[in-house]
Amino acid sequence: MNRFLFLLAGALFVFASCKKADYQKVTHNPELYRVTVKKLNDIVLENNFPPVIASRNYVYANIAAYEVIAAGDPKHYRSLAGQIKHLPKAPQPDKGKEIDFQFASLLAFCYVGNAVTFPEGSMSIYVDELKQKAKDAGMPSDVFDNSVAYSDSVAKYILNWSKKDNYAQTRSASKYTVNRKDGRWIPTPPMYAQALEPHWGEIRPMVLDSASQIPAPEPPPYNMTDKNSVFYKSLMEVKKLGDSLTADQKNMADFWDDNAFKLNVIGHASFATKKFGPAGHWMNIAGIGSQLTKADFGTTVAAYTQASIALFDAFINCWYVKYKSNSVRPETVITKLIDPEWRPRIQTPPFPEYISGHAVISAAAAEVLTHAFGDNRAYTDSSESEFGIPARTFPSFRAAAQEAGLSRVYGGIHYKNACVAGNMSGRRIGDLVNEKLKLKIK
């Protein structure tokens, strides 16, 4: 009888272990995190979040997920508390309760994602699916409840912290005043939209001490009277390229367009088309890097988080420079002084030209992803395929960032010097993020 009870206990232990392994195979799969980030990306796209605000959506959701992972595995991951100097210490898990930290990190990501996007509850159905997936995989009820409770506590702490970043205050800040002096930015067709987020440089950064910490060189002064001036030559370069684009240059411009809201005007009719913004595009690339290197769950969350921090700070720095320079877009000058019928390959966005946002944020993200996944990591980016744009292959993340900047010249919306300067600023921001933040413990 004692032997029978011993065998029965052993069998039950094996069965319980198998059940535990079964649910962990589901909840610890890094693909589930990649899918979850993509879910938020889709919501950001569908609800037309401008690129700078989208970066805010991603960064707080990813940090919430990462803080859960760091709390669950302190031997391998450092909390960002203190590394981001204004981030307080996260709530710690109760040592007496079993928690599935990977599952909790997914829920924390969604909780914050729900709160920083609209309409409210956009991720609720997906959260229900995640919870059902865990239950169907055999997660014990106590582990499930403990994980949900801990994810909620971390998410609430991140949301409370996020409310101090000056975002709410900028919602009621003064609007941009258009100055029609030559060389200054003015709204462009077809939307003639008001300047986008002129106060974004006032948002609290994560790693930068201030928006102005990484200075950019002054742009070439506006000069259309001297054909040998840097400005005149730069402008004519944009026009000449735009008039004779190769098929590959057109594809490059379209691939990196990342216009979250393009207004199409045909006769008297108009309609909008949407795509991922630049931050969303680089979130997709972070996922490609994770998949390509077969990164585990924690490494995947850490890479997304560090990339989102670099993107967030890069946008703050870039927007500070943009509204400090208030530089005119090529389209404005070309149509006024050279060819009134000229149009850029892609739609000119509603904010000043210098420096190139794509160049800054792409270079910053590329430095972080290179740090996370390795240099010269060749990859194919098919994330634009859902918009009918062919995939492109790159020898490295840095090469992709260089192309992203150059694409804006082919697109007709930037002068080359804005892209070169932007890439330099972005690399410095990415380097600073890598230097200041040590997420993984080697």
Image (spheres, helix red, strand yellow):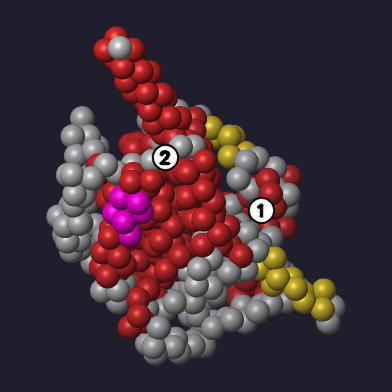
Label 2: which residue? 139
Q: Which amino acid does label 2 sit on?
A: Met
Q: Is residue 212 above or below residue 69?
A: below
Label 1: which residue? 254
Q: Distance between the residues labelled 2 and 1?
A: 45 Å
Seen at 42% across and 40% down, the residue is 139
Answer left or right for 58 relative to 288. Answer: left
Residue 353: x %, y % from top left: 49, 69
Residue 402: x %, y % from top left: 48, 45
Q: What is the count of numbered marks?
A: 2
Residue 29: x %, y % from top left: 45, 35
Span highlighted in magenta in the image: 145-152
Q: In this view, does 157 lie above or below 375?
A: below
What secondary structure is found at the residue carrying circle 1? Answer: helix
Seen at 62% across and 59% down, the residue is 275
In this view, the residue in front, 181 or 302, is 302
What secondary structure is the stretch in magenta mostly built from? helix
Seen at 53% across and 73% down, the residue is 119
